[in-house]
Amino acid sequence: MNRNEVNPIGELTLRTLAMPADANAAGDIFGGWVMAQMDLACGIRAAERAKGRVVTAAVKEMAFAKPMKIGDTLCIYIDITKVGRTSMTLRVEAWAQRYLSDLMERVTHADFVMVALDGEGRPTPIPAE
């Protein structure tokens, strides 16, 4: 098992509870719901780094290793791995803290590419840190 399957990598950016409305009839949380939470967390972290508006430009390959269940807490960790002129790449890990437990399991991970936009919706340079 490699390191990032044992401990989350990145900054904890979002925590939310998986509820029955987010699940199928078997109690498994929809993958699309997990992905939407990952995208939301990327928007938060990327906007902080860009000091302004950002949009999702791409999501690189994503596969689900473990299911989320009703009652689990979804924890999204983000590491900004690359900053270009107008875009950045964020490594995103989604972890499930199992219901009423300290057990944490990685559900999925992906690289998201976010682009900074100006007031007219055109790509704009990302400020230096």
Image (cartoon, rainbow, N blue to C red):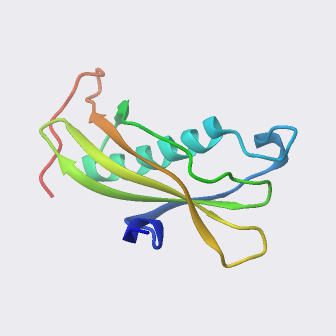
Image height check: is 88 above or below 69?
A: above
Q: Extreme right residue here? A: 25
Quadrant of residue 103 within the rendered picture: bottom right
- At 19% from the left and 49% from the top, the residue drawn is 82
Quadrant of residue 84 within the rendered picture: top left
Image height check: is 68 above or below 116?
A: below
For the C terminus, which image quadrant?
bottom left
Residue 4 image position (x, y, % from top left): 40, 66
Quadrant of residue 111 within the rendered picture: top left
Image height check: is 115 above or below 82?
A: above
For the N terminus, which image quadrant?
bottom left
Q: How many marks do you count on the picture? A: 0
Residue 87 image position (x, y, % from top left): 22, 37
Image height check: is 68 above or below 21?
A: below
- At 85% from the left and 43% from the top, the residue drawn is 26
- At 37% from the left and 65% from the top, the residue drawn is 10
Q: Is residue 20 left or right of residue 115?
A: right
Q: Extreme front residue here? A: 1
Decide which of 19, 52 is in the foreground and name it.
19
Decide which of 11, 50 is in the foreground and name it.
11
Q: Extreme bottom residue here? A: 102
Residue 55 image position (x, y, % from top left): 37, 32
- At 46% from the left and 66% from the top, the residue drawn is 5
Residue 125 image position (x, y, % from top left): 14, 37
